Image (cartoon, grey):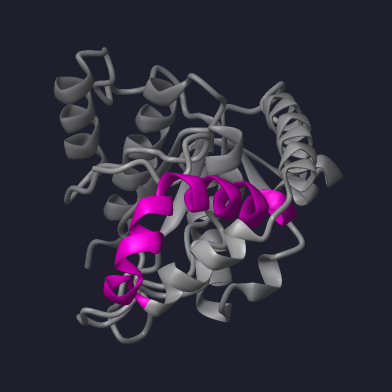
Amino acid sequence: MKTFAWTLDTTGFFAASVEDVALFAALLGRRDLAADPLTAPPRIGIYRSEIDGEASTEMREAVKRAADIAQKAGATVVEVPEPDQIRRGRDVHAVVQGYEAAISLAHELAFHAGQLSDILRETLEEGRSIPPHAYDEARRVARHARKAATGLFDDIDVLLAPAAPGAGPLRSLGPTGTALFNKVWTLAGNPSVNVPGLEDAAGMPLGIQLIGRFGRDKQTLQAAHWLEGEIAARLQP
C-alpha cells in the first residue's frame, strides 16, 4: 500500500456481506465494529444532490426501492437536500487529490513515467500544475464540507444514496467505473457501506450505499446490515 493523497486515502474492505465486512474491519483494526442487531429501525435520509442525474434510471429506482423496503420495515425515511458547502467540497476533490498525488508519486513520475498508466500519468502531471494557493483554498472548502456533513445527522442516523452511477461492470481488467458518488464522503471522512442485494434487469448488482456520521462506523455497519437483511427478506422468491 502506498500513499496517494494523504488527506483522502481510505482503507476499504470487500466481502460477500456487510456482516463479513464488519468482522474483517473489527479484527484488523481491533475495534468493536461488529454489526450487532439494531434495537430499533434506523432513521434514514435519502440524500438528494445535484449529481443525481448522473445515476441511471435503474440506479435511481434501486435507491427508491431500498427506501420503500426500509420504510415498510419500520424505518423513518425523509429526504435530505445537499448543502452548498458539500457540493463545493465535491468540486474541489480533484484539486486536493491531484496536488497531493503529484507530491506522493513525484519519484515515480520523474523516473518511471513510461511504466505508469495513461490516466495516472495525466493525473500526476495535472497535479504538478496546481499552485499551492489553490490547494490551500481547496482544503478550506473541504473543511467547511466536513462541518456541513456533520450537521446532516442531527435528526437521522444514516444517509441513503447511489454508490455508483449504474450497475457493476462485467468482468474485465479495465476500470471499475467512476467514483463520482463516493468522492465527497471520502473528502468529508464519513463512513460509507455498500449494501448488496438489488440488481438490474441483467442480474448485475446495483450498489446503494449508506453513509454515517464521522466516527460512527459501527452504527453505520449496523444500519447497513439491517437494510441488507430487509432487502433479502423481501426479494426472496
In x, y percent, where is residue 82? 77, 47
Q: Which residues are magenta?
A: 90-117
Residue 131: in magenta span:
no
In x, y percent, where is residue 106? 43, 52
Q: Main secondary structure of the magenta part?
A: helix
* Residue located farthest toward the bottom when viewing the structure as drawn: 202
Residue drawn at 54 percent across, 45 percent down: 100
Asked if 222 appears above or below 79 in the picture, the reply is: above
Answer with left or right where residue 161 lies relative to residue 22. Answer: right
Asked if 128 appears above or below 138 in the picture, the reply is: below
Residue 3 location, quadrant? top left
Q: As rendered, which of 66 and 220 lies closer to the eye?
A: 220
Answer with left or right where residue 52 lies relative to residue 217. Answer: right
Residue 76 location, quadrant? top right
Q: As rendered, which of 222 and 124 lies closer to the eye?
A: 124
In x, y percent, where is residue 138? 74, 43
Residue 128 visible in the snapshot: yes
> The C terminus lies in which quarter of the figure?
bottom left
Residue drawn at 44 percent across, 74 percent down: 119
Residue drawn at 38 percent across, 49 percent down: 194
Residue 96: in magenta span:
yes
* Residue located farthest toward the front when viewing the structure as drawn: 111
Answer with left or right where residue 84 lies relative to residue 73. Answer: right
Asked if 80 appears above or below 180 in the picture, the reply is: above
